[in-house]
Image (cartoon, rainbow, N blue to C red):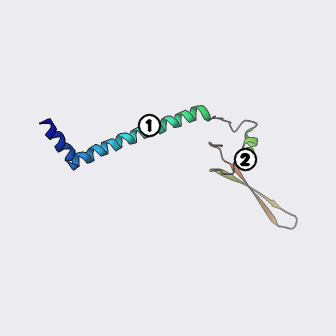
């Protein structure tokens, strides 16, 4: 009797599909958890956080250093300096500086 039930269950396409979807869901959950564990491990062991307040004496130097060494800034601010010359010509200089926030380095 059990043999007939097993054969009938395995040969049923709906049951096979449900078992396949459950297996796929479980595999997806295991992979997601493994990726989370790897991210936490890398963050704890290979990432250093440094917070510099904007009142610190080295803050402006650090912003200049970031703009010089990080060519792939994601958020930055523009500082515009306008000068008028004696011949009534205006010259403008644009400086792209890193904005306050988090910056990642390789």
Count of marks, rendered view: 2
Q: Is residue 44 left or right of residue 17?
A: right
Residue at point 69%, 39% (across, down): 54
Position of residue 95 relative to residue 35, above or below, is: below
Residue 19 placement, left or right of 81: left
Q: In the rendered image, which quarter is residue 42 located in?
A: top right
Q: Residue at x 73, y 41 (%)?
A: 62
Q: What element carries label 2?
A: helix
- Measured as percent of width and height from the top left, residue 49 is found at 63, 35
Residue 81: give x, y in percent of width and height. Answer: 77, 56
Q: x and y percent of residue 52 in the render?
A: 68, 36
- Quick one: which residue is furthest to the left in this view? 1
Quadrant where the image shows the C terminus: top right
Residue 53 image offset from top left, x and y in percent: 68, 36
Local packing at callout 1 (Cα closer than 10 Å; few below 14, some 14-19, many 20+) is few
**Image-quadrant location for residue 82:** bottom right
Which residue is tagged 2?
69
Q: Which of 1 and 82 is in front in this view?
A: 1
Horizontally, residue 40 falls left or right of residue 27, namely: right
Q: Quadrant of the N terminus?
A: top left
Residue at which label 1 appears: 33
Q: Which residue is drawn at 48% across and 39% down?
A: 35
Disc 1 secondary structure class: helix
x 31%, y 42%: residue: 22
Distance between the Cα atoms at labels 1 and 2?
35 Å
1 or 2: tag closer to the N-terminus: 1
Which of 58 and 89 lies nearest the eye of the viewer? 58
Horizontally, is 103 left or right of 79 in the view? left
For the residue pair 14 and 35, the one nearer the viewer reads as: 14
């Amino acid at each position: 009797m059990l043999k007939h039930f097993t054969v009938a269950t395995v040969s049923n396409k709906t049951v096979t599909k449900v078992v396949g979807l459950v297996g796929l869901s479980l595999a997806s959950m295991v992979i997601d958890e493994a990726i989370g564990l790897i991210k936490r491990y890398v963050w704890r062991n290979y990432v250093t956080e440094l917070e510099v307040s904007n009142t610190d004496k080295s803050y402006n130097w650090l912003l200049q250093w970031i703009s010089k060494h990080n060519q792939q800034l994601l958020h930055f601010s523009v500082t515009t300096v306008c000068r008028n010359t004696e011949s009534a010509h205006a010259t403008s200089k644009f400086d792209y500086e890193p904005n306050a926030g988090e910056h990642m380095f390789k």
